Image (tube, helix red, strand yellow):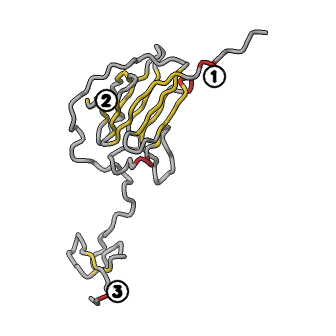
């Protein structure tokens, strides 16, 4: 190995143990083993323990009517996702797929979702006919939590104003915000 600015870094092969391999190599020239992950976070990274908090009861309203907006705010970055009540039937929460470019309705990729353990199709928010919203965990690797309680996969739970949804380590705060009454005035009959 040369010294100074011309020194070359080497890596060790996980298969054959050779340590004289150029750091830029992706395949071991001696045994052919893969040295680097070609697509990092192609699948959801399984985090150690995402069940780290006690459940916290919240008592906001569950009533979600047509004169409201659903606002999801990511706690760390402050990024907001807003949806008109009339447009909410089913919203997928997750991160974009780097292979296909497909993105869920609530794309959390920019919120460091991959590092925080968010699956591509992590959870779904569904609007019920009775005027309520429910959340469903889609059997995500790192779980979905509602106010600190882990959800059973594919079992709907009612969402309330002020709830916190946690996907792995990423937290979304739920708000039901009324729209301006002037924006939703029906037109006068003719």
Nearer the camera: disc 1 or disc 2: 1
Residue 182: image location, x then y, percent? 64, 19
Q: Quadrant of the N terminus?
A: bottom left
Q: Say which residue appears at 37% left-offset and 54% top-offset.
A: 41
The residue singled out by tag 3 in the image is 5
Instruction: Tell me where residue 151 sits by quadrant.
Output: top left
Identify the element where label 3 is drawn. Answer: helix
Q: Say which residue appears at 32% left-offset and 46% top-offset.
A: 117
Q: Quadrant of the C terminus?
A: top right
Mark with earlier residue (1, 2):
2
Instruction: Tell me where residue 180 sits by quadrant.
Output: top right
Q: How far apart in space, not on screen, are marks 1 and 3 (Cα)?
A: 65 Å
Q: Say which residue appears at 35% left-offset and 88% top-offset.
A: 6
Which residue is at the front of the view, 151 or 38? 151
Mark with earlier residue (2, 3):
3
Q: Is residue 156 above or below residue 16?
A: above
Work out which residue is located at the far bottom of the displayed protein and give it.
2
């Amino acid at each position: 190995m040369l010294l100074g600015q011309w020194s070359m870094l080497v890596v060790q092969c996980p298969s054959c143990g050779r340590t004289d391999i150029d750091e830029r190599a992706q395949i071991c020239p001696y045994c052919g083993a893969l040295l680097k992950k070609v697509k990092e976070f192609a699948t959801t990274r399984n985090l150690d323990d995402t069940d780290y908090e006690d459940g916290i009861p919240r008592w906001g309203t569950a009533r979600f009517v047509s004169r409201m907006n659903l606002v999801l705010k990511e706690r760390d970055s402050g990024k907001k996702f807003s949806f008109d009540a009339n447009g909410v039937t089913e919203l997928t929460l997750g991160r974009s797929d780097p292979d296909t470019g497909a993105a869920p309705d609530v794309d959390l990729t920019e919120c460091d979702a991959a590092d925080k353990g968010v699956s591509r199709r992590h959870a779904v928010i569904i609007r019920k006919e009775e005027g309520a919203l429910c959340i469903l965990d889609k059997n995500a690797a790192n779980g979905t939590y509602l106010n600190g309680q882990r959800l059973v996969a594919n079992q709907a739970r009612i969402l309330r104003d002020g709830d916190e949804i946690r996907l792995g380590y990423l937290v979304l705060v739920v708000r039901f915000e009324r729209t301006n009454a002037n924006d939703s005035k029906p037109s006068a009959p003719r």
